[in-house]
Image (cartoon, rainbow, N blue to C red):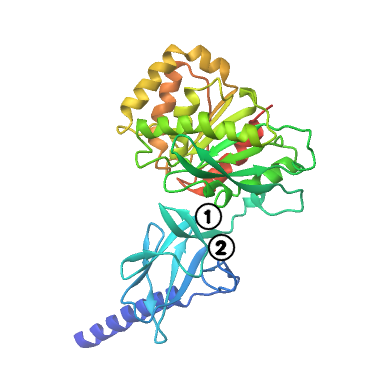
Amino acid sequence: MKNLISLLYFLCFFGFEAKSQNNKTNPDTSGSVPAVTNVRGAKYPLILSNHRVMFRIKAPEAQKVQIDFGKKYDLIKDNDSFWSITTDSIGEGFHYYSLLIDGIATADPASESFYGMGRMASGIEIPFAGGEYYAEKDVPHGDIRIKKYYSTVTKSWRQLFIYTPPGYDANINEKYPVLYILHGGGEDERGWATQGKTDLIMDNLIAEKKAKPMLVVMPDANLGAGAFGEDGLKAFEAEMKQCIIPFIENNCRVKNTSANRALAGLSMGGINTLYTGVYNTNYFSYLGVFSSGWIVPMQNSIADAQYDYMKQNSSKINGDLKLFWLAEGGKEDIAYKNGQIMLAKFNELGIRHAYYEYPGGHTWPVWRNNLYHFAPLLFK
């Protein structure tokens, strides 16, 4: 009798495990679609109806294959040397991920790659029911342009991306306001232009007359290894004032007053915005800080110096700025706590600001939404 019970337990347990593994490698694929971020003709990654993602990769010599979304998934090898797995449900919007083969992180050859995480990484776009604001629509479209400029700060040639609104080339007598927008750590000037969907967001806002036509300038905020230290922040401040703004105003049809300039950034770019923007309110009338705040305790001395400056210059800051807009990605945002500490300090110092919160963490779905809500507030 004891042996029979043991056998039944084994069969039930094994059957459950087999079914579980089968669901991971051979799930119901009805209603599934290849990710729009797949390279041309690639079926996988395959997005299932419940936002789970199925991966299938051929790696005959590999000993172990994983997919890393922050959480790692072990793929299972079949007899044809294909490795497969189906993830848990992945949040809507854009996400970086890595393919790990025997512990080595690499980009998935079946997916488009993006510069993020400090290297070229795979990216996947999970369909988003609320993503109509960055969908491709039958509206007038602007352009994304790439320009080279010489930096007297770095003594090197650098590049930036520029969004020009619909009609920019035709309306040769019109000048436009400018939003300078900055990427986060581990990214560069390509971030807002590709992962951020800046052109589509702006095209749709302008078409709906929710935002004024404007240029959006996307520079590279990486100036050396110490980007989060005061030397790096000072270097970027100099880059903006000595190189980027003069280049744009000498080469594009833009209005060159502070009332027609805005500066914003996400994460590391938000810290650059705090440093460059608060100390230079004679340059900018609008500041946007997304998923950011002074990093405690690493930047305490930098923050304390700025808070002292704010205390002494609160009337000037409040008078110069038409909008100081701060946003966080909910409590799951890694910058949330530091952001709340900073907000409390602003209240204490009497610095006027607006606060917006959109749940989603420290991710591109949040920052796209931030741009969508920030841009209509500019240049009124």
* Residue 302 visible, this angle: yes
Looking at the image, which is closer to me, 190 or 77?
190
Q: Amino acid at mark 2?
A: Thr
Q: In the picture, residue 229 is in which quadrant?
A: top left
Residue denoted by label 2: 37
| Residue 230 drawn at (x, y percent) | 36, 30
Quarter of the image with the N terminus in it: bottom left
In the rendered view, does 268 fall on the left or right side of 321?
A: left
| Residue 81 drawn at (x, y percent) | 40, 83
Asked if residue 128 is positioned above or below residue 20 in the image, the reply reads above
Residue ID at (65%, 36%): 251
Residue ID at (47%, 28%): 276
Q: Secondary structure at mark 2?
A: loop
Badge 2 crowding class, 10 Å Cα cut-off, few under 14, some 14 to 19, many 20 or more, is some
Q: In the picture, residue 335 is in which quadrant?
A: top left
Residue denoted by label 1: 94
Q: Secondary structure at mark 1?
A: strand
In the rendered view, does 299 fall on the left or right side of 211?
A: left
Looking at the image, which is closer to me, 49 or 104?
104
In the rendered view, does 235 fall on the left or right side of 197?
A: left
Asked if residue 278 is positioned above or below residue 223 in the image, the reply reads above
Label 2 close to label 1 by CB (< 8 Å): yes
| Residue 257 drawn at (x, y percent) | 64, 23
Q: Residue lying at the far left in this picture: please name it.
A: 2
Circle nearer the N terminus (2, 1): 2
Residue ID at (70%, 45%): 203
| Residue 19 drawn at (x, y percent) | 40, 78
Looking at the image, which is closer to me, 290 or 247?
247
Q: Amino acid at mark 1?
A: Phe
* Residue 356 visible, this angle: no
| Residue 216 tag number | none
